[in-house]
Image (tube, rainbow, N blue to C red):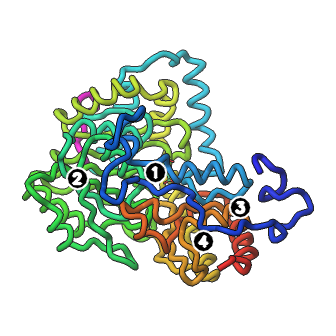
């Protein structure tokens, strides 16, 4: 029912409950990520294939797929994490001005000087980190490219990379594209603690890097200083680099964000990836960055240059201005999201979802077993079509999809009215969940 009218894609006058539901809800949608035959072979190994083995090992992003389905069924998108409200007026103005002022050709490939200076200044001001804007900052097309370019810069095929699980889905394909061998270390439910013994066991002489993400997507964990110190100690012991995705650095509720690069000895073995998307609500601008020791930054610059040449020049200029917003902006941002978190945590719990309240970022990973016997994919598919709310199936965040079958992820980076309507739709539709 593409582009159908009505609040959730139903024809006018037709209630959601009147829709005819398919007999089989356990459809093969979306296909499982990291596709392999039972013997572990990719399809390409069996014969000549027009597409590479690399890309056959993963499917398109389930998060982005859910956004398309949300559009198709006119559902509220609590799947892909982007705000449904506008960025600050001053930031939009800065972008328009930059276009008018002639910042319309390529910038220096690794970032316009003004933005790199603004990034370095902010790391110094907020975290006390000494960052050389010319030798240590690479501006990228979003933190997505920041992480990909960083992995390409440090990882050789066969290198082992430690990933804490569940993990943001991009890290799986990022690792495959680099030829990395992933070592997954599960975070311990229900509050997603780091299991230090399991982490220690994951290190080996082949370990090249550890991927960290704090505040964490999808769990909402904000790793504590002691946990980061334990990670740092192991990384020093085994001579391992840390690739840390800190895109939600200003969205924390219960504990302050600690960049692992600020721990003793870590600045020299850490690549810190972040960006403008979540802090300034400009996910479509695609302006992110990686901050790294000079030798690694040189490698990232090369990977970045040949991947994209550069991030959009006028938007880089605008982000440089955004980085100068007063500190009250960041406090207000976290305060706004804290209220949304509290409302959604209470609302979802009242509906029967079992969850640990996130400490940061804007996602809630929730257990669905008290709500439905469906698996994550069937439930997400049913909910987007018949409940008018899009969520992300939990399996998208696990290497073995079976580990996420009883979970879905909600985001709450939406206007209060949107969240209220989503809760209302959930309340209305859950009693009709087929099993
Ligand atoms: N990080 C966001 C999420 O997890 C979206 C990222 C993206 O789709 N590029 O939903």
Q: In the image, 305: left or right of 407?
A: left
Over which residues does the magenta segment extend? Answer: 129-135
Q: CA distance from mark 2 to mark 3?
A: 38 Å
Q: CA distance from mark 4 to mark 3?
A: 21 Å
Q: Nearer the viewer, mark 1 or mark 3?
A: 3
**Mark sitting earlier along the chain (1/3):** 1
Q: CA distance from mark 1 to mark 2?
A: 36 Å
**Mark sitting earlier along the chain (4/3):** 4
Q: Nearer the viewer, mark 2 or mark 3?
A: 3
Q: Is residue 121 visible?
A: no
Q: Is mark 1 within 8 Å of ligand 1?
A: no
Please report contact status of discs 2 and 3: CB closer than 8 Å, yes or no.
no
State the residue position of label 3: 385
Mark 4 closeness class: few <14, some 14–19, many ≥20 residues within 10 Å:
many
State the residue position of label 4: 344
State the residue position of label 2: 161
């Amino acid at each position: 029912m593409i582009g159908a009218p009505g609040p959730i894609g139903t024809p006018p006058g037709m209630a959601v409950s009147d829709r005819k539901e398919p007999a089989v809800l356990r459809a093969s949608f979306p296909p499982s990520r990291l596709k392999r035959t039972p013997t572990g072979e990719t399809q390409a190994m069996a014969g000549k294939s027009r597409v590479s083995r690399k890309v056959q090992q993963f499917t398109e992003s389930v998060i982005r797929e859910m956004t398309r389905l949300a559009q198709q069924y006119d559902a509220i998108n609590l799947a892909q994490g982007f705000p449904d409200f506008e960025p600050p007026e001053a930031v939009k103005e800065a972008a328009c001005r930059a276009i008018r002022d002639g910042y319309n050709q390529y910038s220096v490939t690794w970032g316009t000087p003004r933005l790199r200076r603004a990034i370095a200044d902010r790391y110094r001001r907020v975290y006390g980190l000494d960052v050389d804007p010319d030798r240590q900052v690479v501006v990228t097309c979003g933190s997505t490219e920041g992480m990909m370019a960083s992995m390409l810069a440090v990882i050789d095929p066969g290198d082992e990379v430690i990933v804490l699980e569940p993990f943001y889905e991009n890290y799986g394909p990022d690792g495959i594209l680099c030829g990395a061998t992933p070592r997954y270390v599960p975070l311990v439910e229900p509050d997603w603690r780091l299991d230090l013994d399991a982490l220690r066991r994951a290190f080996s002489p082949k370990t090249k890097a550890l991927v960290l993400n704090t505040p964490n997507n999808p769990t909402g964990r904000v790793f504590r200083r002691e946990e980061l110190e334990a990670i740092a100690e192991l990384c020093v012991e085994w001579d391992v680099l840390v690739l840390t995705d800190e895109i939600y650095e200003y969205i924390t509720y219960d504990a302050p964000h600690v960049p692992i690069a600020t721990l003793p000895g870590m600045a020299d073995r850490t690549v810190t990836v972040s960006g403008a998307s979540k802090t300034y609500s400009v996910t479509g601008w695609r302006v992110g960055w990686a901050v790294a020791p000079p030798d690694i930054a040189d490698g990232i610059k090369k990977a970045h240059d040949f991947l994209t040449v550069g991030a959009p020049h006028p938007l880089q200029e605008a982000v440089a201005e955004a980085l100068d917003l007063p500190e009250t902006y960041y406090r207000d941002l976290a305060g706004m999201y804290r209220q949304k978190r509290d409302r959604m945590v209470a609302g979802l719990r009242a509906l029967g979802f079992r969850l640990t309240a996130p400490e940061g970022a804007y996602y809630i990973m929730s257990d669905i077993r008290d709500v439905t016997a469906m698996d994550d994919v069937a439930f997400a598919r049913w909910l987007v079509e018949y409940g008018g709310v899009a969520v992300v199936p939990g399996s998208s965040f696990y290497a073995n999809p079976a580990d996420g079958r009883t979970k879905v992820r909600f985001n709450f980076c939406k206007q209060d009215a949107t969240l209220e309507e989503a809760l209302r739709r959930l309340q209305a539709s859950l009693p009709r969940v087929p099993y």
